[in-house]
Image: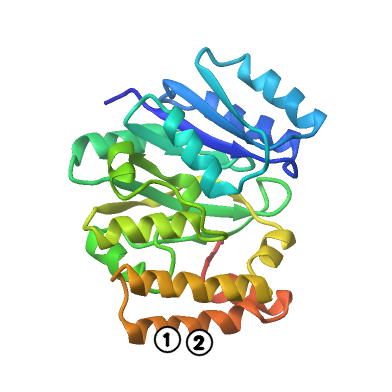
Amino acid sequence: MKEFSTLLSVYKYEKAEYIKTCFDSIYKQTLQPTEIVLVEDGCLSAELYQAIDEVSKQFPHFIRVRLDQNSGLGTALAKGLEACHYDIIARMDTDDICMPDRFEKQMNYLTEHPDIDVVGTWITEFVGDPSNKISIRCLPEEPEEIFEFGKSRNPINHPTVMFRKHAVEAVGGYMPFPLFEDYHLWARMLSQHHRFHNIQESLLLFRRSPEMMLRRGGWSYAKNEVIFQKALYQMGYISWLRMIHNIILRYGIRIMPNTVRSWIYSHFLRKFVS
């Protein structure tokens, strides 16, 4: 059970210095991954290639999956999943930072709870420097709570998950679903009675920026939100009334000005860092 893969994806607009910081946090883990799988989603910048060359030389089992064209996160992670050799997989984004004992705590939990297929954690959001922590995204702990919470909001912080590959593949794995690739996967798993757990501790520093808030709004995002809520209803995870409720509430948030949406996220959907 101590053997596991770490799966990441990178595309051309990410920053080389963030990748170095990300991998530095992986290499300092108290429990090291057995292999690292990095999907290069389309052509990257010269700076990114150089950074990847540097970090890949520091790890003995580093697999680079190269996609000729940018295909989006769902397709990239599906290709990466195929390249992972181990049943336990830890996800991470290339601009985030792990706490040193993240992998060890999650692996211990999965080892002690064979009925759990996905284990996530809280995240601490920061702006600019990692010391500038602004908020924590807390999520429910137990499988039953997560099942209900997921009917209205994403119940898992995607960059923190460690999951069982066979359980993810049992529902079709990652699929292209713009802006909702991870939530769509969790909903499929939850609707088919897979069990989730969230460790009640922040084990990852999540980089937050104004651009992130922009990506979570606008007419295109609102349209995809409606499509996603319909998908939740069609798979039997939510009722028709819940679908209508979610569309009305979330559609309004998506088309708000960015500053207003950011304020709502900060004041109602996060816990302030004291």
Please tell me which residue is depicted at 71% across the width and 57% down the height of the picture. Answer: 209
Image coordinates for residue 235, horizontal then vertical, percent: 32, 67
Q: CA distance from mark 1 to mark 2?
A: 6 Å
Check contact, mark 1 vs mark 2: CB within 8 A: yes
Residue 3 quadrant = top left
| Count of numbered circles in the view | 2
Residue under label 1: 244
On screen, 107 above or below 122?
above
Q: Is residue 70 left or right of residue 28?
A: right
Residue 248: numbered disc: 2
Q: Please rate how many residues cluster around mark 2, counting C-alpha atoms within 10 Å: few if below 14, some from 14 to 19, many from 20.
A: few
Image coordinates for residue 201, horizontal then vertical, percent: 40, 50
Please tell me which residue is depicted at 38% across the width and 46% down the height of the picture. Answer: 173
Please tell me which residue is depicted at 30% across the width and 80% down the height of the picture. Answer: 239
On screen, 73 above or below 247?
above
Image coordinates for residue 62, horizontal then vertical, percent: 54, 19
Secondary structure at numbered mark 1: helix
